[in-house]
Image (cartoon, helix red, strand yellow):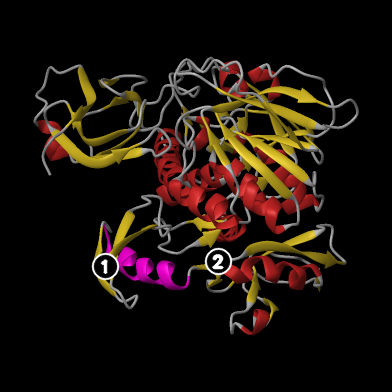
Amino acid sequence: MTRIETVICIGCPMGCEIKLTVGAKGEITKISGNRCKEGKSYAPQEYKNPVRILTATVKTANSSRPLLPVRSARPILKRLLLPSMPVLAGITVTAPVRVGDVVVPNLLDTGVDVIATGELLS
Amino acid sequence: MNLHEIDVAVIGSGPAGMAAAVRAKETGAKNVVILERAEELGGLLHQCVHNGFGLFYFHEDLTGPEYAHRFIEKTMDAGVRPMLETMALNISPDREITAVSNKNQFLKFRPESIVLAMGCRERSRGALNIPGTRPAGVFTAGTAQRFINVEGFLPGRQVVILGSGDIGMIMARRLTLEGARVEAVVEVLPYVGGLIRNEVQCLHDFDIPLFLKHTVTNIYGERRVEGVRVAEVDSRMNPIGGTERDIACDTLLLSVGLIPENELSLTAGVELDPVTGGPFVDGARQTTVPGIFAGGNVVHVHDLVDNVTWESEIAGESAARFAMGERIPAWAGIKLKAGRNIRYVVPHTISGNEDVTLYMRVREPEQNVRINVGDIAGKSELIVKPSSMLKIELTSEQLKKLGKNVTEVVIDCQKWGGK
C-alpha cells in the first residue's frame, strides 16, 4: 500500500507542489513536482519533521528603540515556534548589539541560537 | 557637500533608494544624496522582521532588518550622503527640490538628476467603503506591523484580517506568535492574494481559517471594534444574502492592496500609468520628465525586494549617466503593450538596443501558459498568478529580430498545450 502526500515548498516564491510517494512503512519511494534540488531535500523534511526560521523581537534597555528584531540562526522544529515565544518574552537586551550577536544561546535545547537581526547603538 | 553641487538626489531610503544611490555612485556620479523623512535609512524594511528577503540578490534567506543593514553599509561605504529627517515637499519640472528638515529647516536645490524611490502605501478603510460604525481597532496590516515589531504594542487580542495579501498573512502569524487569536483571514477573490509560501507558513502552520470568496460587510462596536459581519460573495463580488455570519473580534486588519506613492512625482509633472499607479518609465527607468528617474514600489508594487533592488539599480545608473551629461531621449523607443491576460508590463518602452528585463503581472490565474514577447521570445509557465510578478530577460541579440521600424511589441499570455 503506497499513498501520495503533497507538500508545498516554501524555499522560494515559486511554491512548488511536491508529491511524495510513501510506502507502507512510511518510507519515501518517489519525489516529484519539485523544480529544483532544494525542493527535493525540503519535501521529505517537511513531511517528517517540518522546520521553520523563527522571527520575532525582544525588549531593549538603554535604547531609544523599544524592540530589537531577532531570528533563529537556523530553522527549528515547527512545533517549537509557539513554545519559543515565552523564552523571548523573558529577554531584555542592552546596547550595544550588532547584527548577528547571540541573544539567546541554544533555544529550548535545540542547539540553535537566537541572533540579532538589527543593531542597537549605545 | 554644497547643496548646489549635487549630481543625483534620491528621494526615499528604502531598498529602492539605497540601491539607486549606491549604483549612482558606482557609475561615477560624484555627489549623491538621499532625502529620507525618517530618522534612519532603510524604510519599511525595519518593520518587516520576517525572513524571505534576498534569496535571489544575496542567495541568502535574510530578514528585512538584515537586508536593510547590508544596504545601509553599502550606502555609507559608497560615500552617499544621507539627509535624514528631511522631507521633500515639491519637485519642479526643471528638477528643483523643495524640502524641509529638522537640521537645515527649509531647503531648495537643483540636482543634475533625481531618482524617485518613495515606495508605496496601503489602501485603507476609506478606499473600501466598509459600512458600520467608526470604532478604534481598525488598522491597515502595515500599521499593525509597525506597532508590533517596532513600537512594541499589541494592537488587539482577537483579530479578523480582511485581504490575503502578503503583509496580512505575515501579520496573522506574527499576531498568533505574540499571543493574539486570529479568527479568520477573509479574501474576496477565489484565490490567495499573496505568495503561496506565506499561505503555508503563516496560515496553515497555525491553523488560521481562510475564507475565500468572502468579504467584511459590516463593522460593529462603539468605542472599540466588537465584531465584524462576514458574507460570501458571488462572481461579481456582491455579498450573497443568507450567507452572513458575525465574528466577534476587537481588531480588524486590512491587507487590501498597496498604492505607489506618487504625490511628489505629480508635482514634477511626471505622467502616471493608471494601471500600475506609478510613473511611465522607459528601459533606463526615466520618467516622462527628462532627468527624473524612478525605481521600486513607486513604479509598480513588487512582491520581492530583490526585484526592487535590481530595478532601482537601473534607475541609479541612468541618473548618474544623466548627471554626467549623457542625454537619454525621454519616452522614446519601442512601446511594450500588455496583451491577453497581461495586466501591465514595466518598463513601458525599451530602446531595443540593450539587454533588458521585463517585469509583468497577469490579470487572472492560469495554468500551462506561454508568455510571448511579440514573436521574438517566450517563456513557458506551469502556473501564473496575479500575486507573482513574472520576469522575462531579453538580450540585444533577440531584440535585433524585431527589425528597424517596429514601434510596438505585444506581450501575450497564451494557453499552451506543450511541455
Residue B146's disc is none
Task: Give me the residue at 45% from left, 41% from top.
Answer: B312
* Main secondary-structure element of the magenta-colored stretch: helix
Q: Is residue B322 left or right of residue B209?
A: left
Does B55 appear above or below B155? below
Tell me the residue that label 2 is attached to.
Answer: A53
User: Residue B181, position in %: x, y?
Assistant: 73, 49
Task: Give me the residue at 33% from left, 63% from top.
Answer: A39
Q: Nearer the viewer, residue B303 or B31?
A: B303
Which numbered disc, 1 or 2, marks the residue that appears first in the sequence?
A: 1
Q: Which residues are magenta?
A: A35-49
Q: Residues within 10 Å of mark 2 (few under 14, many from 20)?
A: some
Label 2 resides on the chain identified as: A
SS for callout 1 = loop
Task: Give me the residue at 56% from left, 50% from top.
Answer: B203
Front tag of 1 and 2: 1
Question: What residue occupies the far front of the structure in this picture?
Answer: A1
